[in-house]
Amino acid sequence: MLTQYGMFMAKFGRNKAPEASVGQVVAAEPTARTVVAHRDFLLSHVEQAKPFGIGLFEARGLTLCETLASDIDLPLFSAATVDGWAVRASNLVGASPQRPIAMPVMGEVVGANTLPEPLPVGATFRVSAGAPIPSGADAVVPYADATELGDGASFEAEIPVRSNVRERGTRVSDGSLLAVKGSELTPKVIAALSEVGIDKVLALPKPRVAVGSIGNDLVAPGAPLTRLRQRYDYTTALYATAVEAYGCQAFPMPILDEDEQEIARSIKAQAISSDLILLIGEATDSLRAALAATGEVDYAQVAIRPAGPQLFAVVGEEKVPLLVLPPQAASSYVSFEVFAVPLLLKLAGLDPLEREVINQVPDEKLPFDPDVPQFLLASLKDGLQLLNLGEDAGAIELREVDVIVVVPPGQEIVPGRKAVCWVPER
């Protein structure tokens, strides 16, 4: 089910920290904040993208910024489904072999290009299958069920209203809702809008998110490892593809060395065309200095486990938000889900607090902290099983994560008691 994770965050304490603002001074010690205070602080620095008009063929995957309804009926007209006689069913009430009812034939409708004249009371029209029936007619008698008499026809049976008629507007009627504001423009939605004649929509552009990893020993996949300490970078791939799952467009960055000037140059370049920059790396003095050289920095110690100090900045003349995730697998994954996902959702025009949530009963007592909320990575393969990701863990271990168990501070969750679990995008 979808729910607002603010409901659960409330249990983590909403004691207000002093009003926070991003500043150029990089403090040696981080500012202390609760999870909620830090999340709200980050959201205050992110603006939803501006809507724009776009042709339907280019709108796939975007978020609709208007509610759209049909302004036509489909089918456009009521048509005969058989060759026969268009009639008013009420004119044949009482018809029988003993008491046939004769009516004059007013004309014939063969094609579907023009609508016939209205049907007078007590008269009939010849119609072909697929041709429009005249207004006033509400049934079609098959040819074989009536007798033609010169300029008229004789009917020996009653007929129910709407018999052998495909009525106008039975598929879609004028005013029918087709797509609501905030929905994704999928191929099927786009096709439905096209079918009623809509060719342009008001939509949100996909936010552009630059994603990059920092580390002297990181190597891009495909390149050779030349030193024992080197390892392949998986975090850029992980979070660039995760960003796409939340309605944004990812732009992977080259791996950055732990060099203040190189980091500053890269950030300035990315800020020109990005709505958000996501970096993965240690919150070192050199990284904080590089961020301070390009914008304004916030350094916070958030009461959350696992994680570490949280580094954030607004950079460049464009004041682009930049979020740094810690490099350790568990801390990075949790920081992304708790802090980055709300930013991505807000940028994409979606509710930043809405998450898919399920309830699971653990087989054993879950660890908890009296003061700090915990976000525990878990698998559902054999019931709810916690995953212990060590310092050397990476993407191989993260493959096992099915849910994130949310444990508010001081709350004991024991077997038989349901635990709230977030379901990350897969």
Image (tube, rainbow, N blue to C red):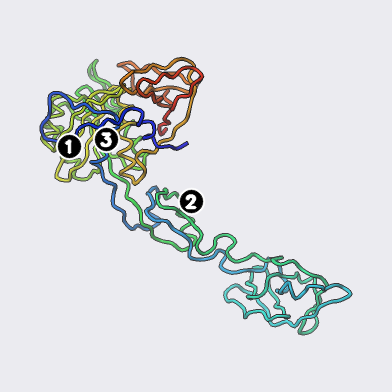
Q: Nearer the viewer, residue 157 or 80?
A: 157
Q: Is residue 346 above or below residue 179?
A: above
Q: Nearer the viewer, residue 159 or 258?
A: 159
Type of residue at label 1? Ser
Q: Position of residue 401 (x, y in %)?
A: 41, 24
Name which quarter of the figure residue 80 lies in.
bottom right
Q: Quick one: label 2 or label 3, which is nearer the N terminus?
A: 2
Type of residue at label 2? Lys
| Residue at far front of view | 15
Q: Nearer the viewer, mark 1 or mark 3?
A: 1
Name which quarter of the figure residue 124 lies in.
bottom right
Q: Position of residue 39 (x, y in %)?
A: 28, 34
Name which quarter of the figure residue 412 lies in.
top left
Q: Position of residue 205 (x, y in %)?
A: 32, 50
Label placed on residue 188: 2
For label 1, count other residues whose C-alpha is less than 10 Å away and answer few (under 14), some (14-19) or many (20+): few
| Disc 1 to disc 3: CB gap under 8 Å | no
Confirm whether residue 237 shows in the render.
no
Instruction: Say which residue label 3 marks.
Output: 211
How far apart in space, not on screen, are marks 1 and 3 (Cα)?
24 Å
| Disc 2 to disc 3: CB gap under 8 Å | no
Q: Quick one: label 1 or label 3, which is nearer the N terminus?
A: 1
Q: Nearer the viewer, residue 125 or 349?
A: 349
Q: Name the side, left or right, on which 340 lies relative to 182.
A: left
Residue drawn at (33%, 31%), measured in percent from left and top? 338
Instruction: Say which residue label 1 marks.
Output: 21
| Residue at far right of view | 98
Type of residue at label 3? Val
**Element class at badge 3:** strand
